[in-house]
Amino acid sequence: MKGICYSAKIMASSNSGAHHRIWSLLLACACLVGAGVSAAQQTTAPATPPASAGTTNSDFAAAADEVLGQMSEITGLKLRTPLKKSLRTREQIRAYVIKEMDEDKNPAERYAGLRSAEAFGLLPKGFDLDSFMVELLTEQIAGLYDPKTHEFYVADWIPIADQRMVMAHELTHALEDQHFQIEAWVKAARPNDDAELARESVLEGSAMAAMVDYLLQGTGRSLQDLPDIDPSMLIGDMEGTPMLQKAPPFLKDALIFPYLDGLNFSAAVLKPAGWSALSGVFAKPPVSTQQILHPALYRSGKASAPVALPAMDKALGSDWAKLEDNTMGEFGWREVLKQFLGEEKAEHLSPAWDGDRYLVYERKQTKNLVLVTRVRLATEEQAKSFFGQYSEALEKKHQKRTDESRQSALLSFETPEGGVFLRCVVRECVTLEGADRTVFNKLNKELDWDAVPEPTKQAAEPPESFPMAN
């Protein structure tokens, strides 16, 4: 979700690939208990680097060439052209982060993503996402690979001994770039933010898998030999960094998702055949975060059909401007459910996702927001469950509400920001937040659904089955 996944898709509000690759520089490999292998490879930078921590160009170049050769042997990806390598100061790396942010999304696109995240309740109102991401990504950065310039950078204040794990990860990206042109490959998923995040997860997950094999060198074992592993064991004290501790839960999850869930996906895909299977993943990439979360769906080729939403421009009027029109995916909806219902309920309900679409509009003068969503669930029974659970989520999201009505598969109430509506028909549920009943009626008409029942204050249990669509 370039929108919501900013720097992480967030759908989040945030963005994309280069930022994901920068994030990998914060990784600290702690241990692989299942393999009986441990490594104290601390890659984070001290606040005040000691004078003896400097790295010379010759030492850096020699180490990078050595690790590059090892990663080529591990992945089977041959180095096709010499790789540019350089040491960078903290100021240079910070400047790169800002430049990359500006080039990946213009200010209007970043603003739209931020407001969309606010509309879903994933980021607090007034959150300065740009500033936060710059501080976070440069807090303890160690090195990065830039697919635009095809150059590998390492921070000049960190000893080489502490850089090799970062090199293993980033130089995997460099090799993948020479074979698969990773920048263009990721962006080919646009404008579907969920699909773009899935491709980012392939990049970061495969680099994590390569890093595991790098760790296991000399043990006679590889990723293929390991039992199922807990990827969280590979991130060390990443969550203990000061800026990350301050991050809203959604932003933290969106930043980590490509690495941990991407590793699980890569392990599942690579285990049967080994690294020879990697080219097949680039040739036929996963189409959603659902396929990342459930690799068996990727292997079977099961994908959700597109979901459409009618434009609401006319229904809202000329005072409103559309900010976003995109897809949340299973990951995005899991985050929304987790935000208001907790992790256990989110983990139980989100796999029922079978497609979605959302629209975000902003009132030009007041900056009020309207959020429209349409979610398809795998079965009618799961749609009934979604209605009950998401009704609770909306009530928690909008604490100040009046005129609440719940009947059949329809929930509605009023808030200081406008009306809130949730309706489910067969396997699909739609929501409207921030507009009145007239707009909601028009939405239902555009969907070719039966007329919206009149509101009632009498609460009712959900029916045995939802009404059928026309």
Image (spheres, rainbow, N blue to C red):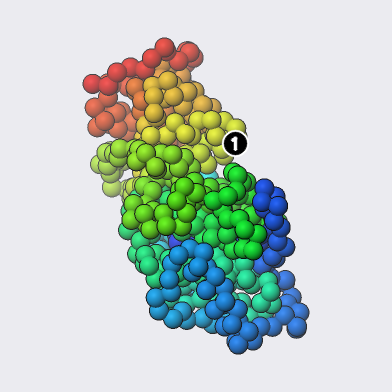
Picture quadrant where residue 26 is located:
bottom right
Q: Residue at x 45, y 15 (%)?
A: 462
Q: Residue at x 47, y 54 (%)?
A: 274
- The answer to whether residue 365 shows anywhere in this view is no
Along the line of sight, the residue nearer the viewer: 214 or 16: 214
Could you say where residue 87 lies in the image, as x and y percent from the top left? 58, 82
Q: Residue at x 61, y 55 (%)?
A: 221
The secondary structure type at the circle numbered 1 is: helix
Q: Is residue 36 above or below residue 180?
A: above
Could you say where residue 321 lies in the image, as x and y percent from the top left? 33, 50
Along the line of sight, the residue nearer the viewer: 459 or 85: 85
Q: Residue furthest front?
A: 220
Q: Is residue 170 above or below residue 316?
A: below
Would you call the spot at circle 1 few (<14 residues within 10 Å), some (14-19), or many (20 or more)? Answer: few
Q: How many marks?
A: 1
Asked if residue 231 lies left or right of residue 74, the reply is right
Picture quadrant where residue 185 is located:
bottom left
Q: Amino acid at mark 1?
A: Glu
Could you say where residue 46 lies in the image, as x and y percent from the top left? 72, 71
The residue indicated by pointer 1 is: 343
- The answer to whether residue 301 shows anywhere in this view is yes
Q: Residue at x 45, y 51 (%)?
A: 273
Q: Is residue 149 above or below residue 115?
A: below
Could you say where residue 250 lies in the image, as x and y percent from the top left? 56, 47
Asked if residue 177 lies left or right of residue 448, the reply is right
Along the line of sight, the residue nearer the viewer: 389 or 241: 241
Which quarter of the image is occupied by the C terminus? top left
